[in-house]
Amino acid sequence: MTSAISRNWEHAVVTGGAGFVGSHLCAALLDAGAAVTCVDDFSTGRPENIAPLLERPGFTLVQADVAEELPVGRPPDLVLHFASPASPADYLRLPLHTMDTGSLGTRNALRLAQDAEARFVLASTSEVYGDPQQNPQDERYWGNVNPVGPRSVYDEAKRFGEALTTAHAQTHGTDTCIVRLFNTYGPRMRGHDGRAVPTFVRQALAGEPLTVTGDGHQTRSLCYVDDTVAGILAAAAHGLRGPVNIGNPGEITMLDLARLVVELAGSDSEIRYIERPVDDPAVRCPDITLALDKLGWEPRVGAEEGLRRTIAWFRAEAGR
């Protein structure tokens, strides 16, 4: 992952650094020689995600709600704003907190970057495309989002965050970048966070039926977390403003994903169909032409290998 870093960052601030993707970013930056300040309120992040980092030189943990304050002492040269509930189970449980983090939290992170003259990277999402009428989705597509549906607190928080980041760059000259992440998965996901991969893996390892929503023909494009982190850091180092899609263009139906997890887990679990959530996207697939052309980035870990690693991690966690 560190090969994507062409700048020698001295001090990086990672908001949401105890979360799934954030904790992997913290580790990658430390490996590259940067000092890292992780800011998290632990509303969805987990202490165990960063426990191995606490004794590493250069790592600092600050417990704070980024929508209220960002108490970072040493000025950073890189701000990665990844704080936000990201799974349906979390943002439906914390709707106002999700919107505050995407608005006030983004504003505070941008001010920190502006005052320190630091590079700023916003973690946006493929959810800004909503239930897309274009497939695959490239960065020019404006999306098809229900602004008052059950998913809107997350979708609109991220869309507002993109608009705020763009306005900040135009008004203050802040050095910003927007990355749109597509269905990242891997170790450190929570088994009950409501997303497909951890849900299927948890169910398969427990011998429970895998709950596929609707008819299972809706698609997602899964990107292993190591690839996602490499893409984020490549975008940070390049200077690209974005938005830029960071995802794996390998599209898979949820039914095929469930069957693959059962096979790789060596499980005899059955498939059970349940009601499909409101506004659940029918397709999701990134066009990564921009990332490939500008960043020289593309995913390297295939679905089978990534799922094997993820299943092995979940199995080890269950053993603990």
Image: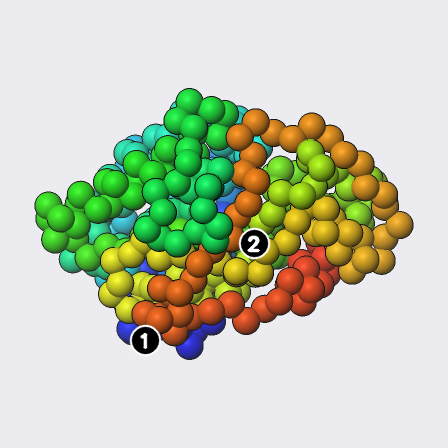
| Nearest to the observer: residue 218 or residue 49 | 218
> Relative to 142, is 302 on the left or the right?
right
Residue at label 1? 6
Label 1: state its secondary structure: loop
Q: Residue 221, which numbered label?
A: 2
Give the answer, above or below, for where 160 lies relative to 112: above
Residue 285 visible in the snapshot: yes
**Which residue does the image show at 46% across and 41% down from the upper left?**
133
**Crowding near the residue tagged with mark 1, few <14, some 14–19, many ≥20 C-alpha atoms within 10 Å:** few
The relative height of residue 239 versus residue 126 in the rendered view (above or below) is below
Instruction: Determine the residue positioned at 26% across, 63% down.
Output: 240
Q: Is residue 71 above or below residue 275?
A: below
Amino acid residing under circle 2? Ser
In the image, taking residue 145 as reference, residue 73 lies left or right, namely left
Residue 281, image x, y percentages: 54, 38
What is the x, y in percent for residue 2? 43, 73
Give coordinates of residue 320: x percent, y percent: 74, 53
Q: Residues within 10 Å of mark 2 (few under 14, many from 20)?
A: some
Q: Residue at x 48, y 30 (%)?
A: 151
- Relative to 155, is 317 above or below? below
47 relative position to 239: left or right = right
Q: In terms of sequence position, does the residue under pointer 1 or pointer 2 come before the other?
A: 1
